Image (cartoon, grey):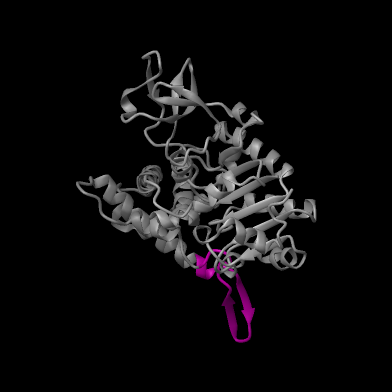
């Protein structure tokens, strides 16, 4: 059989990687020898977070006896995360270059301009709004930089089940789909001698160029799909065009191909998707190829094992909803100690969970990935989950 293993950020926690809330707090920690721009960016993020957090509690206003009551933003958990902050700063940045297609951005910026008070520079309203737009762009870069640095960790623990799945005779192909930007899965597979394809070709000097045709190799027993990019993906100017690649060297400014030709990175930051509008980028560049193969994989798979995913990506959630509807024989085992946390965060999960569970399509094992074995999966699936 073929198994799709779907991983989210929670699967990386045993190796010391932060949760979304912990990563958000990292944004507000002072840096060593930081410059004035960084301090201003952090101050702007504080203003935006305060505004966003207050707004979470205001939405959903309904009339009740004697006044009004607010439900709050039902699926946001009452907090503003680094993903939310990135999205808002990105909208500000796009507004500055005339690419905003949302009429709500301008009044939002006007509100932030009033709240920012002495943070923004300029003697006129127009000058302060312009300064805010520039700060929004800097804030996006800052958030991505902090996230990339924080996620540069070595594998420590939690993935023993992956090795079991990659080597068990019942599974002819293990397809690991992850939303994580870290490289823990790759580190773990390589350290345990598990060969895998990941959408990139053979080494060429300091890089491995993107080549999604490797997924077509039917002899590949383990395949890795990183839907949101990675902290080691970069774009390089090569042969007159931009080409994505995994960077293997130690100095990005001194990268070369196998012939010794210098490689210039288009951006100093890696290529991964942030914010709550990531679906817009699913149709762009390398992500188009990765998601094309993922969509095909969903069509071919009737067994999914999921761990660490908080059901926070609406586009991905709709795909799972359609996958459940496609066939009653499609079954998903969910590894989560408290599944109610998921139904509290996702409309798709909340509306579908009970029906999927009652039909036998969704089986929840209240354990984390790091606490689960292949025998646990088979026992939960009445001995048939890993059978063809």
Q: Is residue 379 above or below residue 179?
A: below
| 152 sits left or right of 202 in the view | left
Q: Nearer the viewer, residue 291 or 335?
A: 335
Q: List the single residue furthest toward the left.
A: 33
Identify the residue at image location x=77%, y=64%. Answer: 359
Q: Quadrant of residue 135?
A: top left
Q: Nearer the viewer, residue 18 or 2?
A: 2
Residue 312 image position (x, y, % from top left): 57, 56
Q: Nearer the viewer, residue 349 or 174?
A: 174
Is residue 30 visible in the rendered structure shown here?
A: yes
Identify the residue at image location x=62%, y=38%. Answer: 291
Residue 142 image position (x, y, % from top left): 36, 45
Count the marks: 0
Q: Is residue 36 above or below residue 190?
A: below
Q: Is residue 22 magenta?
A: no
Residue 14 image position (x, y, % from top left): 42, 57
Q: Quadrant of residue 257?
A: top left
Q: Nearer the viewer, residue 329 or 209?
A: 329
Look at the image and give the residue range highlighted in magenta.
56-77
Q: Quadrant of residue 293?
A: top right
Residue 321 image position (x, y, % from top left): 71, 55
Q: List the single residue furthest toward the front.
A: 169
Q: Is residue 75 magenta?
A: yes
| 136 sits left or right of 211 in the view | left
Q: Is residue 111 above or below residue 297?
A: below
């Amino acid at each position: 059989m073929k198994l799709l293993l779907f991983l989210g950020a929670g699967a990386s926690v045993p190796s010391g990687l932060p949760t979304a809330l912990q990563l958000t707090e990292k944004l507000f920690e002072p840096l060593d020898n930081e410059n004035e721009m960084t301090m201003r960016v952090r101050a702007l993020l504080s203003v935006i977070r305060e505004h966003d957090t207050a707004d979470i509690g205001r939405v959903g206003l309904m009339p009740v006896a004697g006044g009004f009551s607010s439900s709050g933003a039902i699926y946001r958990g009452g907090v503003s995360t680094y993903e939310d902050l990135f999205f808002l700063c990105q909208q500000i940045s796009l507004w500055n270059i005339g690419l905003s297609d949302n009429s709500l951005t301008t009044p939002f910026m006007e509100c932030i301009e009033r709240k920012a008070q002495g943070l923004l520079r300029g003697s006129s309203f127009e000058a302060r709004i312009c300064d805010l737009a520039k700060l929004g762009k800097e804030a996006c870069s800052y958030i991505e930089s902090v996230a990339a640095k924080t996620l540069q960790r070595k594998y420590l623990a939690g993935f023993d089940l992956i090795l079991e799945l990659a080597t068990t005779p019942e599974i002819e192909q293990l397809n690991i789909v992850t939303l994580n930007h870290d490289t823990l899965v790759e580190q773990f597979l390589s350290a345990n001698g598990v060969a895998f394809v990941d959408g990139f070709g053979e080494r060429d000097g300091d890089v491995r160029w993107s080549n999604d045709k490797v997924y077509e190799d039917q002899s590949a027993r383990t395949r890795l799909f990183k839907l949101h990019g990675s902290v080691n993906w970069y774009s390089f100017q090569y042969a007159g065009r931009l080409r994505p690649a995994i960077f293997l060297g130690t100095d990005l400014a001194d990268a070369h191909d196998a012939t010794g030709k210098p490689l210039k990175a288009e951006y100093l930051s890696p290529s991964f998707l942030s914010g709550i509008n990531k679906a817009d980028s699913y149709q762009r560049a390398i992500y188009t190829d990765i998601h094309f193969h993922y969509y095909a994989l969903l069509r071919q798979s009737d067994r999914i094992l999921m761990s660490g995913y908080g059901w926070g990506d609406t586009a991905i959630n709709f795909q799972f909803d359609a996958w459940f509807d496609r066939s009653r024989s499609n079954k998903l085992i969910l590894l989560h100690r408290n599944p109610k946390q998921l139904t509290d965060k996702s409309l798709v999960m909340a509306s579908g969970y009970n029906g999927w569970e009652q039909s036998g399509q969704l089986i929840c094992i209240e354990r984390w990935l790091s606490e689960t074995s292949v025998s646990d999966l088979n026992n939960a699936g009445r001995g048939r989950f890993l059978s063809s």
